[in-house]
Image (cartoon, grey):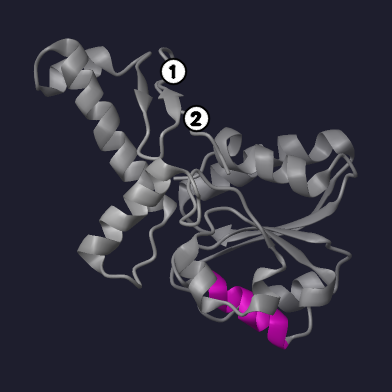
């Protein structure tokens, strides 16, 4: 899932631009989101940014008007946003219906092609995001991967960073087995820390030897 260093910091750096904008944080109840948003404030405050409020919803929530009314009564400029699954598009559409699109931008953590398909052109214009993979990447490796998935799932299937990240994880595991000279859980645990591998889209990534975290290149 998204992490503060991997997904949030570059997104805030881009949205904020050193200007110290006014944010409202919206997400769901999973503990990792609460931790991520807590860490996000360390990237907002150094430029004198402000957090005007935070709302966490139940997973599967579909009615966001009360939160949007709260936001509308503040001077919020940017909504730092992470609503899982398709429900996030409902938030954007309800904001549009309430006439809030003109005054807000949405820094959407985890936005992908499935969301893109459900929103209008006007709504998509207000969304700012970063990702380890986009289906329109014109590199040969990325186009080959999209073609491979679509051959299996159909031409209208959205190929998202979920597919990319899982496929890259399988490649990293295979590289770890090759390095260890055997296929086993013990071999993987021994070989993965510090491993450099080629992602499915052609980037050379490295798994940190201490944290065991792999920060993927973003687009």
Residue shown at the point (23%, 20%) measured from the top left: 176
Percent across and percent down for residue 1 are 44, 45
186 lies left or right of 1: left
CB-based contact (under 8 Å), mark 1 and mark 2: yes
Q: Quadrant of residue 141?
A: top left
What residue does disc 2 label? 215
**SS for callout 1:** loop
70 lies left or right of 49: left
What residue does disc 1 label? 208
Q: Is residue 58 visible?
A: no
Quick one: quadrant of the C terminus? top right
Toward the bottom, the furthest residue is 97
- For this rendering, which residue is in front, 184 or 44? 184
Q: Is residue 49 magenta?
A: no
Q: Which residues are magenta?
A: 88-97
Disc 1 and disc 2: Cα gap in Å?
8 Å
**SS for callout 2:** loop
Percent across and percent down for residue 122 are 70, 78
């Amino acid at each position: 899932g998204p992490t503060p260093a991997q997904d949030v910091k570059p997104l805030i750096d881009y949205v904020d631009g050193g200007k110290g904008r006014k944010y409202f944080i919206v997400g769901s109840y999973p503990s990792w989101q609460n931790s991520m948003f807590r860490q996000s404030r360390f990237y907002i405050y150094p430029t004198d940014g402000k957090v005007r409020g935070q709302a966490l919803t139940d997973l599967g929530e579909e009615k966001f008007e009360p939160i949007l009314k709260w936001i509308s009564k503040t001077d919020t400029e940017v909504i730092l946003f992470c609503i899982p699954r398709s429900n996030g598009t409902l938030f954007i559409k309800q904001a549009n219906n309430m006439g809030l699109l003109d005054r807000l931008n949405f820094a959407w953590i985890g936005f992908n092609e499935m969301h893109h398909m459900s929103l209008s052109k006007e709504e998509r214009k207000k969304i700012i995001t970063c990702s380890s993979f986009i289906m329109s990447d014109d590199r040969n490796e990325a186009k080959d991967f999209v073609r491979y998935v679509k051959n299996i799932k159909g031409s209208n299937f959205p190929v998202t960073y979920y597919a990319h990240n899982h496929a890259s994880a399988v490649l990293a595991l295979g590289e770890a087995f090759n390095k260890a000279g055997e296929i086993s859980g013990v071999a993987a645990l021994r070989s993965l820390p510090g491993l450099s591998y080629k992602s499915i889209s052609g980037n050379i990534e490295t798994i940190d030897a201490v944290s065991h975290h792999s920060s993927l290149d973003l687009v």
